[in-house]
Structure formats: C-alpha cells, structure tokens
Image: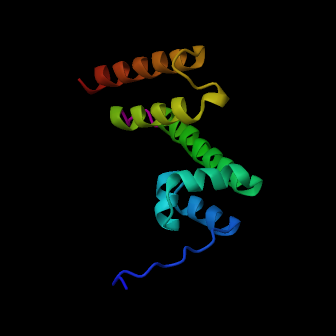
Amino acid sequence: MSSVQKVKKKKLTVQAAIEALRLAGGYQNKAAEILQCNRGYLCGFIHKHKAVKEALDDILEDRLDRAEQGLQDFIDRSDDFSGSRLNAIFFFLKTKGRHRGYNESSDLANEMRNIVTKVINYGSKQSN
C-alpha cells in the first residue's frame, strides 16, 4: 500500500462556494484555492447553481460601486494627483464595468480622460 492515502474530496456546497467568492472578492482563482478545488470545477459549479452566480454578480457589482466611488472621491479631492491610483480605477471600470458603459471607445471614457488630464495639468501648474 502506498504511503500516500487518497482522501475523499469534500462535496462543494452552494453556501461554501458563495462564502469563498466573498472572501476572494469575486476572484475565482482565489476562491478555488480557498475551496481547494480547481478553477474549472468552480466555474462549472457557478454556472450550474443560480444562487452562486447571483452572489458572484452581487460581489462584482459591489466592487464596481466601490470603484465608481473611488473615481468620484478622486474627482472631489483636487489635491490628489496620483496617476497610478487613477489608472487602477480606470482599468477596473473598463474591464468590469463594460455593462455600465465603461469601455475604451465610449464617449464617457474619452470625456473622463479629457477631464482628468485637464485637472492634472491644472494641478501641475498650481504646484509650480
């Protein structure tokens, strides 16, 4: 007999999948690590169980809400000109917020980019 014993895998439950997705912030790779299963299995489980899919959608919508709030906070704080923070917000909105109209080619994205560029340029002139 081998020194490595086979261990039965725990059956994944809807509640365990939802909790892992919450802990992972909606990142399926991280949730799969938490659950000790592979990502493909978790993806299949998500698609088979409406409650898990809805919970994942809620988690991602919450993250979008926080990203939008971060952008609004950035706009409201005219003294914060952190380009890396702004790029992170734009990246998140463009990749996860497409269904809300955030994408590379949208008029909204172009308008936001123009406004932010003007604000940054204005801030640079003020600090000189």
Residue 20, compared with residue 9, is above or below; it is above
- Residues 98 and 53: in front is 53
Give the prevailing secondary structure in the magenta stretch.
Answer: loop
Query: Farthest right residue?
Result: 50
54 on left or right of 80 = right
Q: Nearer the viewer, residue 38 or 120?
A: 38
Task: Give me the residue at 57% from left, 41% from top.
Answer: 69
On the image, the x and y values in percent for residue 64 come to 59, 41
Q: Is residue 93 magenta?
A: no
**Is residue 109 positioned above or below 19 on the image?**
above
Q: Is residue 58 visible?
A: no
Q: Looking at this view, is 9 or 54 the one in front?
A: 9
- Residue 75 makes an appearance in the image: yes
100 lies above or below 62:
above
Instruction: From this view, report whether residue 72 is shown above or below residue 11.
Output: above
Residue drawn 61% across and 28% down?
A: 98
Please provide the residue range marked out in magenta.
Answer: 77-81
Residue 1 drawn at (x, y percent):
37, 86
Total numbered badges shown on the rendered structure: 0
